[in-house]
């Protein structure tokens, strides 16, 4: 009896066949404990050359000038600047799928509470067939095309261009995520860690169709507010780990001053065009680059190019807890990881429905 139960979930499709690949290669098992994440320590200057340090000094002086005559432009005392710029190179994931991973690659770990950001571009029959999650949230934001998800609790849905699915895996989810149309379907998937008190919550979905996503526009800058607040407009999404997720489109010549809570970690991922981030004299950054930002109270951006610039700005309150990740399970201790694998294998503690579930094939 025990054996059949144990064997079953381990014997299925993609997740089984590349199980070890999945667990060991794409996400090296990690154990990280950063007692105090980089954003809430002045020690971040540790990342900086002397040249950059003098830049910070001159920035504070110029801040007052920028905010000077216009009460509407937030004035930052400590504007954030780019501490790391990384190109998200393509890699194979799932079953025949390609992703550009930024957060989660070796150069960009420890952006507490963020575990992974993948820009995916997937055509059928490639995709992400039945696989589990425990201990964190996945946010899927469609950029072009559509994806269908199905889970072991009977949830089934398709998200299309501009839609968001905010999934709290909590104690356990098994689902498939597959392209819903012919040709390339594109989007972003962000993994946000949950605090120890939330890791075993009941799974939950928040679906945000494009038409319900708040937008605001000001001086050549348009923002879609997926989580958090911008230009005085708030998203309805509930984030267990306090998170800001903004999608900005800036016209040529536009400028932006976006406040970010001081102690939060933050980064930018560029989708299209080129922009200047942090300090006005910095080298423009282009699509598929991820920019990790220093601590500070806000971000300044300039589009000095002739084309539109589109990027996401993501920020979150660090959890400051140990992180032990084993592929799709993210917990605080090795014992909890062992427990997660046992629960998954035996169909217990949230994985009960694993025993009798398999996603329906999609017809194309
Ligand atoms: C996963 C490998 C994976 N990025 N982007 C290991 F590929 C996945 C996984 C995804 C994923 C799914 C979508 Cl829709 C978009 C993704 C990785 O499903 F969960 C593990 N554990
Ligand atoms: Fe998934």
Image (spheres, rainbow, N blue to C red):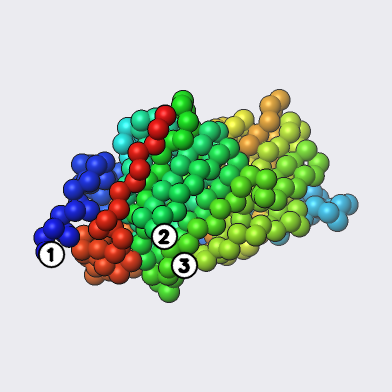
Give the structural element (helix, strand or loop) at label 2: loop
Q: Earlier in the sequence, mark 1 or mark 2?
A: 1
Task: Report crowding for label 3: few under 14, some 14 to 19, many 20 or more residues within 10 A (C-alpha).
Answer: many
Task: Report crowding for label 1: few under 14, some 14 to 19, many 20 or more residues within 10 A (C-alpha).
Answer: few
Instruction: Give percent across and percent down for residue 344.
Output: 25, 60
Which mark is on residue 230? none
Q: Earlier in the sequence, mark 2 or mark 3?
A: 2
What residue is rendered at 41% in x and 39% in y?
178
In front here: 208 or 286?
208
What residue is rendered at 39% in x and 52% in y?
151
Q: Which residue is mark 2?
A: 169
Instruction: Give percent across and percent down for residue 325.
Output: 31, 58
Instruction: Give percent across and percent down for residue 234.
Output: 70, 58
What residue is rendered at 77% in x and 44% in y?
217
Q: Is residue 80 above or below residue 21?
A: below
Q: Is residue 252 left or right of residue 330?
A: right
Q: Which residue is mark 1?
A: 2
Q: Is residue 356 left or right of residue 154?
A: left
Instruction: Give percent across and percent down for residue 266.
Output: 55, 54
Please tell me whether mark 3 or mark 1 is closer to you in this view: 1
What residue is rendered at 26% in x and 41% in y?
14
In front here: 253 or 69?
253
Does ligand 2 reach within 8 Å of label 2's beta carbon?
yes
In front here: 172 or 85?
172
Task: Report crowding for label 2: few under 14, some 14 to 19, many 20 or more residues within 10 A (C-alpha).
Answer: many
Q: CA distance from mark 1 to mark 2?
A: 25 Å
Give the structural element (helix, strand or loop) at label 1: helix
In front here: 149 or 37?
149
Q: Earlier in the sequence, mark 3 or mark 1?
A: 1
Which mark is on residue 319? 3
Residue 85 visible here:
no
């Amino acid at each position: 009896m025990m054996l059949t139960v144990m064997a079953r979930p381990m014997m299925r499709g993609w997740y089984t066949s590349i199980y070890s690949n999945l667990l060991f290669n794409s996400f090296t098992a990690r154990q990280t404990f950063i007692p105090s994440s980089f954003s809430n320590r002045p020690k971040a200057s540790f990342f900086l050359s002397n040249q950059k340090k003098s830049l910070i000094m001159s920035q504070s002086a110029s801040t007052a000038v920028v905010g000077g005559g216009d009460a509407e432009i937030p004035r930052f005392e400590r504007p954030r600047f780019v501490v790391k710029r990384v190109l998200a190179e393509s890699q194979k994931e799932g079953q025949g799928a390609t992703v550009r991973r930024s957060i989660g690659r070796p150069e960009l770990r420890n952006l507490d509470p963020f575990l992974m950001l993948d820009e995916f571009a997937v055509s059928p029959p490639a995709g992400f067939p039945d696989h589990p999650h425990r201990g964190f949230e996945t946010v899927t934001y469609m950029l072009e095309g559509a994806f269908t998800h199905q889970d072991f609790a009977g949830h089934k849905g398709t998200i299309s261009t501009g839609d968001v699915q905010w999934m709290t895996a909590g104690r356990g989810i098994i689902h498939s995520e597959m392209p819903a149309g012919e040709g390339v379907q594109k989007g972003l998937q962000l993994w946000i860690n949950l605090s120890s008190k939330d890791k075993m919550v009941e799974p939950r979905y928040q679906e945000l169709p494009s038409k319900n996503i708040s937008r605001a526009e000001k001086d050549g800058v348009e923002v879609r507010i997926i989580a958090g607040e911008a230009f005085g407009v708030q998203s309805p999404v509930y984030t267990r780990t306090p998170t800001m997720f903004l999608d900005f489109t800036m016209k040529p010549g536009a400028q932006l001053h976006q406040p970010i809570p001081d102690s939060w970690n933050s980064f930018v991922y560029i989708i299209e065009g080129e922009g200047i981030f942090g300090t006005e004299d910095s080298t423009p950054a282009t699509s598929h680059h991820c920019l990790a930002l220093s601590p500070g109270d806000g971000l300044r951006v300039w589009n000095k190019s002739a084309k539109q610039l589109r990027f996401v700005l993501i920020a979150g309150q660090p959890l400051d807890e140990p992180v032990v990740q084993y592929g799709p399970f993210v917990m605080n201790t090795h014992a909890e990881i062992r427990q997660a694998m046992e629960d998954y294998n035996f169909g217990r503690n949230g994985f009960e429905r694993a025993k009798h579930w398999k996603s329906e094939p999609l017809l194309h």
